[in-house]
Each structure stands twice: as C-alpha cells, then as structure tokens.
Image: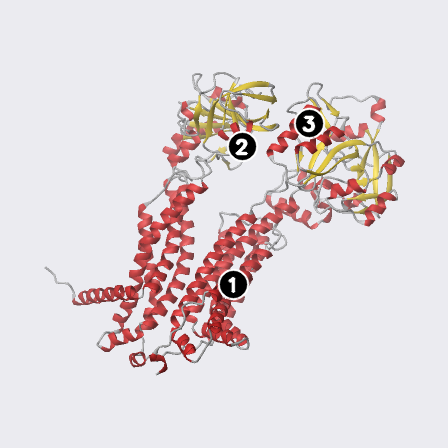
C-alpha cells in the first residue's frame, strides 16, 4: 500500500493547526467574528433568496403548458386570415416574412367533423356596478370545461347552463356588489339580466382581475368565435403535431401544441420555457448579482481580516519566533476566513430561504404567472453555502499575504508599519477614469449612429460589442476612482485639517489607513452608482413617455361631452340641459370647479360614404381652424406608406427636430369622428379652467379686445390665426380620400384675426379661444359642447361608475355613456426609485458601520492615548462624525457622479430618450444620507476609551 506523501502530510498538519488556531482566535474575538459572519451571511442570504425567487418566476415546460393549455392538447388562433405565415414552434408569434395570399378558410374545415373545440373570445360589456355603471372585461367561451382546469379553475358555485348564467372572478363579484345567486344587469352591447352562479379564477390574471365569463353570445358576441382573429380556440382531445402546425400556418393560423413541446422538431431551438433554459436564465441574472455581492463582501471582509491580522501581530510573531514559516502564518489567517465563511454560509442560506419565501408570500398577486412554483433547488443552496467559504477565504487572502511578511522583531516590540502611498496609482486611476468616461460616451454616440444606419440588431455582434462598451466604460471609471481614492482622501484630510482637532484626526486616520477606509468607500460608491444609474434611467424613460403622452385635458379633470350616440335612432344627439351634467358631476366626484364650455363644431364625417348631398347641402359652408401651410409638419407624410425601421427612425428624428411636429393634436388635424372641437368660445374664466392656471395678462387682454388666444404657436402666422370655410362637398370628398380635411385647397372664404399664444403646461386637446362677441362678429355658430370639471382628488373607479350611471340616466341611454377622466401617463419610477434609495441606504449604512467599527477597533490604542492626554468626549464624538463624512460622503459623491455618466450616454440627442435626473433622490443619497450616517456616528461614539498602562509606559 502506497504511503501518504510527506508534503501532503505536512500540509494537512499545517491546515489542522491553522484551523484550530483560527477557531480559537475567532472565539476570543466574538465581536469581530460576528461582524465578519454577518458580512458573509448578508450577501449569501441575498443570493439564496434570489436563487429561490428568480427560478420560481420562470416556468418549466410542464408549468407553462398547465397555465396556458390547462389539460387541452393545443391552442390555435386565426392570426392572419388569407395569408401564409411561419411561426415559432414554442410560441404563437409568427416569424420571418409573410407569405402570399391564400383562400380564407373556416377553422373547423381544417379538422375532422367530430373535433371538439372550445373557442374563447375576450370582449367587454357595460353593466351596473355597486356604485354606478362601468365597462367591464368579459370572456365568452366554455372556460369552465374540465379540460381547461389549470388555466381556468371554478372556485365556488356551479357552472353556467345557458346564456343567462355567468361566472365572475372574485374581484368582479365585489365590484358588482353581488353574491352568488344574485342577478347582474347588463346594459350593452346586449341589455338583459344574468344570474351569477359561480366564481372562476383565470390563473393568468392576478386576484384583483375583474372579469365576467359566459357562453358564446352571452355578452353579444358571435357564436362562431373560432373564426374571429381575436379568439383563442382550444382542442381538448385532438393532438396537433409539428407537421399539422405547419399546415395550419399555410392558412394564417398559429398554434401552441402540447405535442410540439414534448416532441420538438429537430431543427428548432429548445423551447424558451424548458427546464434547461429556465435554469440558464436565472443563473445568468443571479450570477451578475452574486458577482456584485462577492465584490462587496470581499472588500469589507478583507478590511475586517486586515484589522484582525494587525490585532494578532504579536501572537503571529510569537508563532513565527518558534519556527513557523510564512506558509503557516498565511494558513492561520486564511483559515479564519474559512471558519467564519462557513458559519456565514450556513446562516446566510437559511436566512435567504426564509426571506425569499416571505417575499414570495407577500408579493404573490394570485396569478400563476407571477410565481409558477416554489423552485427551491437544494444543489444551488449547498453550492451557495460552499461559495461562502470561498468568499471568506478570498477576503482573508490579501491580509494573510501581508501578515506572512511581518517583521517578527518589530511585531514583538509592538511597532507599527507605516504604509507609503504609491505615486503611480493615482496617475493610473485618473487615466482609467478619463478612458472609462470616454468609452461610455463614445458607446452612446455609436448606439445612435448604428441605429440610424440600420446596423443594430439585438442578436448581432455589433450589438454585443456595443453592450460590452457601455458596460465596461463605467466599470473602468469606477476602478480608476478606487485607484485615486487614496489621493482624494489625502486631499480632503489636508482641507479638513483646519476644521478642528476631531476633523483633523478623523481625516488623517482615514487617509493613512486606506486598508480599511477604501473598501468601505468602494462599497458605498458602487452601490450609489448602481442606484443613481437605475433611478436616472427610470426617470428618463418616464419623462420621455410623459413628453410623448397626449393629454385630453389637464390631469385630474373630468370631461363630459354633451354630444352622444342615440342607440335607438343611431344618430348623433346633443343633450340640451348641460346644468344637469354639472349637477351630476358635483354629486359624483370631488369637484373643485365645473363649467359648461361652448365651441364651434368641427366638421364631421358623413353618416355614410354613399350619402348623396343635395345641391343646397353640398354648397353649405362649414368652418374650421386653419393651420398655416408654413407651419404644417412635413415629416408626418412619411407615415402614409410602409416604412423600414431605418426610415421610421429617420422620420421620427425629423419630427423630433421640427417644432411644427411636437403636438399630435395639431398635426392630426380635424378628427373625422368629432369630439375634439378646435375653436372654443368663452371668457377668461373658461380659459383658466382649461389651462388649469390663471391666463396671462396678454391672453386676458386679447379676449377682451376681440382677438384670439391660441394654446399652440403652430396656429399663428404673422401674429394671426385663420378660420376658413369649405363646402360640405369638399369635406365629404376629403373623407373619401382617407385624409379628412387635407388636400382641399383654399377655402371658399377665410378670416384672420390677431392672436396671442398662451400655452398650457401640458399639451391638451384645445385649439384656440375667442369670446362670444368675436364669434358672433365672425359669423361662427357656437353652442354648449362639453362640461369640464377640475377635481380636488383623482376620481376613483366607484366615483366614475356613479357618474356614468347618472349621465346615462339623464340621456336615457343606460350604459351608453362614459365620462372621460384624464389620469395622465402611468408612473412607477417614484416608488421604485425610493425603494432603490432605501436599499442603497441600507448597504451604505452597513458599509459605513463596518468601516467605523473597524476604525474604532483598530484605533483603540490611539483613543487610549488621547484619553491619557486629556481628550474630551466631544473629540471622540467628532472623530466618528468626520470619519463617516470622509468615508460615506466621499463614496456617495463619487458614486453619484459616475452613476450619471451612463444615463447621459444613453440619452444623448437622437437617442429618442430625454435625460431627466431625479435630483432630489440623488441629493438625498449623495449628501443627506452620508450626513445622516455621520450624525448617527456622533450620537453613538462607542465605548469610552480606557487608559492602558502599556500605552503610557
């Protein structure tokens, strides 16, 4: 039997001794050991939570099929009738070019006559609710069929037996204010009463989803819905293989087949929801976060081990003096990392699993697509715990190398080694910062250029190179700042040396002990960088969306049009009692101001293209607000025909650069279906309500002097606005050409009057204002057209339902009227940004606490010296305050500055996104947060320094 090699035995003995010493030294310093265990456990807990949460959001094949198909064999849809297409095997998305036209066919003709089909068609229905009337989501089709279980589950009651019985979701039951067995009143498109016989849960929708379910035709839909492109048809018993899917594609039909998932075609890529790809997706995401966490922990844990190694110098020198070599000394310090890393890994994995489970429980919205399952993969958890040992060991490597090089005699004497700052490091750092910023900005410019030329493809090499450039630039800049941070701390120490004893001592301590200062500074800097980048990009995207949003009125206002469609006569009708609308608004919503506004009616489309106008009708002159030819958006004509992506980007850039193309209300011209008159008639009070603010004095004077007030500068030419009259025949002909109001030439007559511009704070659907006297002078017919109300609070769904019901009763058209509430664009960045701020603050506070705690531990002898010479507690408190300012403040300011570089590069002019930084949040995280940390450090200065005899001997 071969004997164990002597070198291996020596290594094992050395490791055994090192682990024993590490275990005992860790037990002798419980505070420092607990700190390191916590540093390791926190990111490990985050990794464990992520390794639980992210896989749970990605469906396996079985889970995806269950929630999509239930127990059926396939889902098919008539996507493009009369066109051959190609589809992806594992989704209902078409790919490649569209084929030639084919003869349209009915879906049932492509399957055997006895094939069972369940068409499901989403629609809407107007119904009475608990508080009024609302338009509600509805689904027609036998969604309660047992084969649909998994996608649609009956949770209470029984299933419908005819078209007079319906199922509802739990949230819809509450919206209607009903119980099982009660009757719901439908108002449109069919008017009838239906009985709620049960509850149905659509597993793809959250618990808050509000939907009614019924047989085909229950809500006025087509009983042959399978041939409707908006319907999804399920095949409970018929297996559809890939060859059959391709045959369906020839008729413009797409299919999602269970058989294709289970037996994928040879040439196809694996399904996007397969187990392998689901695993790969979360591994990539979790890997990025793990890498970030690893860097943070290694920096802070390395600083903690370095302080611990300095505290153990005398003991290590004693071990070295009795014959231990450098490798033994290295093993002792490195073993500390292994022992504490193992404890942190076990604790962190347990905490992470628990935290992840609680997070999933709290954030579960009831949809099966939120978390497809509880995907706790034990090999990953064990790997994370083992990874924690590597984190601990890696954090201890650099301190172990330095400890192995200690001067034994100097350590036994208690002398400290002075570290000399490198002169080359700051120079290299400055170069790295400049190069990183240049790479980032160049990547932003290249992104615009490549996109404009049509060379940028999300799957291409250029896209990958560009992504790498935009990613590597900020990272290089941060590394450069880390190399410069020693120089920055020394410069700040020089500036703070005149701010008092505490500021001088704290700043010099941070500048001289970079081994524990820079790691904490780096953690804060990288954390703030990530937070500022994310917050700025979210704010920029929402600002861009808000800039492109076309408001109907100012946010929070309610618009009630007096014109409505009479469902019995099928004609447009005007309600003659606007005061009743005013009263309904006051009774239903929280009204601040409400007024009836008058307008000159815009031209309307003809009732039918076949309508023949009499000679008198054809010659009738119809007025409209004219847009001066020089102020028309020429770039918009590019959208009249098909466009390539490159041409579309070019047209969009031209429109962005042209002041005449900024407002869709102006560029869209006259709306053929009406409802948005351009010429409003009223006084300055009406104008103030529309603007949501007091008009300018020039606008008030203009109305008083018979002039016009334009809300958009595009309507003015040489300080005048023009109203022109065209014949009714001209308007009808322009509608036939699909460009209502365009290409009609000069009007039969026109009038221009002086005007001033009073733009609203937001682009709203109002053109110009003139007084009643001016309208009469110009010969313009005007009448009451809308009731506009500003509110003290945004109307709720219940208030809007009540208003709809009240108006419907007034016009004797229940369920046929819907108030227009301007809610503005959806926003989510504020909550997410404050959440990021909270997370960043937590990490920053932790990093600062570690740095300050290590400084206090490492500087106990210095504090004792200060106490011995009569230093006051005020100096000790000030020391902690200024130390937090130096470390947390410097890291936060540098991180915020570098965090703005990438958003600037991604929002350069021509990128299509407007740069908008959340300055309040950035100031909070870069200035107020470090100041708060410093104040807390001042309030809790730590234990009172003791005077040791060894110090003053």
Q: Nearer the viewer, residue 734 or 840?
A: 840
Give the number of the mark in front: 2 or 1.
1
Ranked by sequence position, the earlier of labels 1 and 3 is: 3
Q: Relative to residue 374, is residue 74 depicted above or below?
A: above
Q: Relative to residue 698, is residue 870 depicted above or below?
A: below
Residue 158 horizontal/vertical position (percent): 44, 20
Which residue position is annotated with label 1?
Answer: 930
Instruction: Report helix, strand or loop for mark 3.
Output: helix
Which residue position is annotated with label 2?
Answer: 99
Q: Answer yes or no: do the residues labelled 1 and 3 have beta carbons within 8 Å?
A: no
The C terminus is located in which quarter? bottom left
Q: Quadrant of residue 18?
A: bottom left
Give the number of the mark in front: 2 or 3.
3
Q: Quadrant of residue 61?
A: top left
Give the side of residue 315 with respect to residue 78, left or right. Answer: left
Q: Nearer the viewer, residue 949 or 88?
A: 949
Ranked by sequence position, the earlier of labels 2 and 1 is: 2
Give the side of residue 464 with respect to residue 557, left or right. Answer: left
Q: Is residue 426 visible?
A: no
Q: How many marks?
A: 3
Instruction: Report helix, strand or loop for mark 1.
Output: helix
Which label is found at residue 856? none
Q: CA distance from mark 1 to mark 3?
A: 56 Å
Residue 365 horizontal/vertical position (percent): 47, 38
For label 3, the crowd category at 10 Å Cα-Cα, with few meaning under 14, some 14 to 19 and many 20 or more, is many
Q: Nearer the viewer, residue 434 or 506?
A: 506
Q: CA distance from mark 2 to mark 1?
A: 62 Å
Which residue position is annotated with label 3?
Answer: 807
The N terminus is located in which quarter? bottom left
Q: Nearer the viewer, residue 103 or 226?
A: 226
């Amino acid at each position: 039997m071969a004997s164990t090699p002597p070198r291996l035995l020596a290594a094992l003995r050395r490791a055994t001794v090192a682990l024993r010493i590490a275990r005992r030294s860790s037990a002798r310093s419980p505070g420092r050991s607990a700190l390191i265990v916590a540093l390791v456990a926190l990111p490990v807990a985050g990794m464990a939570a992520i390794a639980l949460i992210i896989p749970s959001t990605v469906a396996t094949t079985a889970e995806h099929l269950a929630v999509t198909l239930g127990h059926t064999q396939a889902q098919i849809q008539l996507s493009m009738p009369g066109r051959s297409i190609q589809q992806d095997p594992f989704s209902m998305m078409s790919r490649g070019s569209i084929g030639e036209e084919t003869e349209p066919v009915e879906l049932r003709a492509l399957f055997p006559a006895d094939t069972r089909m369940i068409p499901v068609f989403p629609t809407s229905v107007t119904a009475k609710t608990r508080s009024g009337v609302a338009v509600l989501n509805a689904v027609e089709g036998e969604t309660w069929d047992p084969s649909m279980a998994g996608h649609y589950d009956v949770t209470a009651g029984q299933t419908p037996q005819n078209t007079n019985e319906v199922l509802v979701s739990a949230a819809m039951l509450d919206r209607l204010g009903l119980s099982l067995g009660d009757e719901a009143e439908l108002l449109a498109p069919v008017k009838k009463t239906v009985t709620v016989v049960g509850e149905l849960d659509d597993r793809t929708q959250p618990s808050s989803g509000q939907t009614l379910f019924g047989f085909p035709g229950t809500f006025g839909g087509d009983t042959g819905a399978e041939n409707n492109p908006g319907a999804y048809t399920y095949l409970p018993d018929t297996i559809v293989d890939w060859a059959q899917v391709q045959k369906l594609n020839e008729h413009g039909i797409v299919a999602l087949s269970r058989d294709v998932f289970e037996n994928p075609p040879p040439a196809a890529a694996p399904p996007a929801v397969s187990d392998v790809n689901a695993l790969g997706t979360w591994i990539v995401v979790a890997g990025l976060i793990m890498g970030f966490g690893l860097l943070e922990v290694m920096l802070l844990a390395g600083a903690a081990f370095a302080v611990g190694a300095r505290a153990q110098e005398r003991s290590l020198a004693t071990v070295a003096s009795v014959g231990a070599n450098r490798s033994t000394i290295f093993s002792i310090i490195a073993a500390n990392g292994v022992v504490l890393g193992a404890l942190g890994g076990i604790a962190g994995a347990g905490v992470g699993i628990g935290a992840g489970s609680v997070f999933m429980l709290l954030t579960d919205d009831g949809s099966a697509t939120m978390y497809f399952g509880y995907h706790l993969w034990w090999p990953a958890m064990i790997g994370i715990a083992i990874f924690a040992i590597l984190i601990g060991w890696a954090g201890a490597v650099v301190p172990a190398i330095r400890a192995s090089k200690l001067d034994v005699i100097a350590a036994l004497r208690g002398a400290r080694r002075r570290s000399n700052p490198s002169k080359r490091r700051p120079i290299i750092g400055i170069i790295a910062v400049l190069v990183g910023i240049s790479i980032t900005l160049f990547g932003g410019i290249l992104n615009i250029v490549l996109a404009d030329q049509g060379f940028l493809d999300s799957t291409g090499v250029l896209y990958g190179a560009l992504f790498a450039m935009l990613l590597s630039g900020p990272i290089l800049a941060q590394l450069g700042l880390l190399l410069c941070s020693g120089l920055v701390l020394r410069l700040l120490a020089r500036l703070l040396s005149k701010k008092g004893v505490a500021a001088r001592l704290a700043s010099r301590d941070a500048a001289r002990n970079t081994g524990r200062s820079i790691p904490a500074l780096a953690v804060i800097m990288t954390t703030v960088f990530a937070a500022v980048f994310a917050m700025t990009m979210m704010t920029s995207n929402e600002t861009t969306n808000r800039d492109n949003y076309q408001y109907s009125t100012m946010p929070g206002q309610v618009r009630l049009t007096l014109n409505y469609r009479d469902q019995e006569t099928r004609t447009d009708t005007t309600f003659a009692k606007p005061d009743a609308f005013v009263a309904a608004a006051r009774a239903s919503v929280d009204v601040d101001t409400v007024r009836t506004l008058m307008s000159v009616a815009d031209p309307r489309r003809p009732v039918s293209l076949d309508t023949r106008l009499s000679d008198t009708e054809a010659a009738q002159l119809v007025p409209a607000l004219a847009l001066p030819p020089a102020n028309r958006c020429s770039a918009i004509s590019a959208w009249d025909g098909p466009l390539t992506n490159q041409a579309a980007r070019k047209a969009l850039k031209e429109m962005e650069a042209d002041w005449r193309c900024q407002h869709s209300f102006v560029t869209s011209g006259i709306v053929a279906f009406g409802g948005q008159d351009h010429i409003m008639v009223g006084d300055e009070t009406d104008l103030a309500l529309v603007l949501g603010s007091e008009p300018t004095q020039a606008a008030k004077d203009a109305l008083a002097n018979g002039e016009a007030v334009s809300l958009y500068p595009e309507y003015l030419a040489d300080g005048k606005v023009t109203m022109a009259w065209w014949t009714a025949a001209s308007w009808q002909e322009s509608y036939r050409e699909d460009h209502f109001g365009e290409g009609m030439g000069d009007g039969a007559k026109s009038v221009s009057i002086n005007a001033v511009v009073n733009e609203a704070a937001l682009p709203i659907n109002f053109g110009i204002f003139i007084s009643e006297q001016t309208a009469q002078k110009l010969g313009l017919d005007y009448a009451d057209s809308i009731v506009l109300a500003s509110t003290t609070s945004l109307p709720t769904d219940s208030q809007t339902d009540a208003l709809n019901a009240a108006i419907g009763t007034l016009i004797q058209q229940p369920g046929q009227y819907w108030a227009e509430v301007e809610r503005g664009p959806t926003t989510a960045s504020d909550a997410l940004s404050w959440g990021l701020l909270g997370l960043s603050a937590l990490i920053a506070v932790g990093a600062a606490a570690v740095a300050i705690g290590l400084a206090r531990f490492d500087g106990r002898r210095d504090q004792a010296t200060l106490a011995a010479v009569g230093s006051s507690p005020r100096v000790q408190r000030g020391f902690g305050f200024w130390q937090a300012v130096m470390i947390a403040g410097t890291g936060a300011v540098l991180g915020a500055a570098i965090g703005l570089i990438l958003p600037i590069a991604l929002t350069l002019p021509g990128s299509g996104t407007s740069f908008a930084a959340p300055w309040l949040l950035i100031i909070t995280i870069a200035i107020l947060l470090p100041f708060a940390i410093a104040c807390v450090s001042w309030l809790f200065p730590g234990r009172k320094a003791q005077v040791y005899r060894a110090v003053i001997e």
